[in-house]
Image (spheres, grey):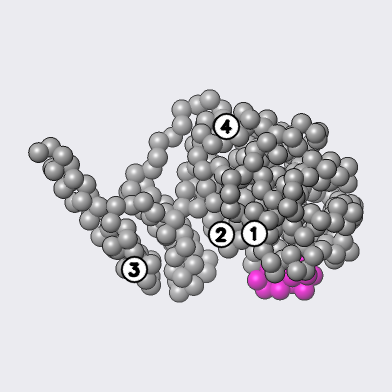
Amino acid sequence: MNVRQHLAENPTCLAPLAGWSDSIFRRLCKRAGAGWVFTEMVSSDGVLHRQSKTMEFIEFCESERPISIQLYGGNSEVMARAAEMLAFHRPDGLDLNFGCPVKKVIKTGAGSALLRDLPRMTEIVRRVVAAVDLPVSAKIRAGWEEDHAVEIALALADAGVQMVTVHARTQAMKFSGKADWCIIQRVKAAVRIPVIGNGDVRSAVDAEQMVRQTGCDGIMIGRGSQGNPWIFSQVRARLAGLPVPSEPTAEEVDRTLLEHAAEMVEHYGEKRAMYMMRKHLLCYLRGRPLFNRYRSMLVNSNSWTALRDNLLVLRLAGQRFDDMLNTESDR
């Protein structure tokens, strides 16, 4: 895959969201306009031992392409061997995680722990690049406690990565505070490889502002896509100077939610799927009139049919609520 050419055609990317970016969600986002999707991060040890959960994470279908599998680990030899194994699954790329701030990942010397060990990070990159005939990219944070993203990105580019995603927060910030897009701008000015900007993109306007400020080659959207796959078509249109699709109606949101749930049921079975859908449901319906009143009923839907019926109850109640407000405002 020609990385730069693909980003020119569609610069939107779905982030490797742990617990979210499974095959079903990736397909949904692709249909909604996402250009490039990334799997949830998978453990290099899990790949070598073919752990069932790990192997589930790397499943994908042709409609998800282009897709990169994101890999994490702290041992260069293990990472290289895992990369070789993943290459047999024919992804379009491998992405190396050097930014995860979760404690259990850091304790293994992986994720953002490597921000404090640049020689080991670059050794991992060199070993992985030598092991596979695939584009290798990396996702980083600004640094551990202070910004040294330019130094990191230059070292990674020199080691062989073809693209770098910059989450414009330090490890210490985790997901709090405001992402500093100036960090992305400095990285873009320093390296010759494509740079993907990540952090606080919640709308098409945010994406346009990030591109204007930083000059980044692509936009990676994570939390902004939760319950909102339409953001990808909106961002793509805005960046192309085309009319931006309007926000979906309540009926369109419900239809997509039910489509999402139906595919989850088919893939995971009804019991597991309805449990997994709870977090998605909360995101799809946030801000909906009267949602808090019907929240318990919706979250405890134990079948696709029950979810469909409960969504109808919520939508009808919301319509009555809107009618009442309109009547009062006319008086």
Q: 207 or 180, which is in the foreground?
A: 180
Please tell me whether mark 4 sits on a helix, a strand or a loop: helix
Callout 2, which amino acid? Answer: Trp
Which amino acid type corresponds to the residue marked 1 in the rendered image? Glu
Q: Secondary structure at mark 3?
A: helix
Q: Which residue is mark 2?
A: 20
Q: Which mark is residue 40?
A: 1
Q: Nearer the viewer, mark 4 or mark 3?
A: 4
Disc 2 is placed on an element classified as loop
Type of amino acid at the residue the image marks with label 3: Ser
Q: Quadrant of the C terminus?
A: top left
Q: Name above or below for residue 234 compared with residue 294.
A: above
Please tell me whether mark 2 or mark 3 is closer to you in this view. 3
Q: Position of residue 133 (x, y in %)?
A: 84, 50
Q: Which residue is mark 3?
A: 296
In the image, taking residue 325 as reference, residue 112 lies left or right, namely: right
User: At which x and y percent is residue 47?
Assistant: 76, 68
What segment is highlighted magenta in the picture?
Answer: 43-54
Q: Which residue is painted at 58% across and 53% down in the image? A: 176
User: Badge 4 is on which residue?
Assistant: 209
Give the distance between the C-alpha atoms of the residues marked 4 and 1, in whole angstroms. 27 Å
Q: Tell me the quarter of the image containing the N terminus.
A: top right
- Asked if 311 appears above or below 194 in the picture, the reply is below
